Image (tube, rainbow, N blue to C red):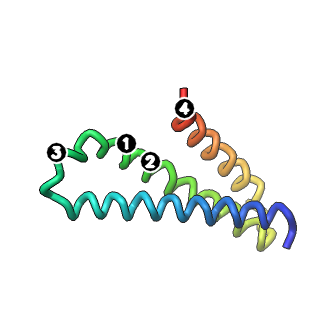
Amino acid sequence: MKPLTALLAILSGSAIALATGLIMTWIVILLLPENEQRFAPEHSHLVRAIVVFTLFAAVSFASFYGQARERHWRLAAHGSTVAVFALAVWLYWPT
């Protein structure tokens, strides 16, 4: 396995795990209707995180797949991965 392929595997695996964890958190909150008022202020932030990191997981996996199979579109997928990663850093970097 080439070094870039291994790095993309780690990146996509981490992104998939993060997106899955956020989705499972959202499901747990949906199953707790008695605490809806308590979690209401966090709902929009959670949905935004789910969208961003699910997109990041999908793009990074496509980049990994393109690199592993040496597809002709892999450079575009790598660029998309960097762009979505930059978006995630921009949105969630502490100020």
* Quadrant of the drawing holding the N terminus: bottom right
| Secondary structure state at the residue bearing disc 1 | helix
User: Residue beneath label 3, please?
Assistant: 37
Amino acid type shown at disc 4: Pro
Could you tell me the amino acid type at mark 3?
Gln
Residue 49's label in the rendered image is 2
Q: Which residue is mark 1?
A: 45
Sequence-wise, the earlier of marks 3 and 4 is 3
Q: Residue at x 43, y 53 (%)?
A: 50
Q: Residues within 10 Å of mark 4 (few under 14, many from 20)?
A: few
* Mark nearer the viewer, 2 or 3: 3
Q: Nearer the viewer, mark 1 or mark 4?
A: 4
Residue at the image point whose x is 85% and y is 63% from the top: 3
Q: Find residue 11 and report its horizontal and vertical position in percent.
A: 67, 59
1 or 3: tag closer to the N-terminus: 3
Neighbours of disc 1 within 10 Å: few (<14), some (14-19), many (20+): few
Q: Which residue is mark 4?
A: 94
Along the horizontal axis of the image, is 32 left or right of 55? left
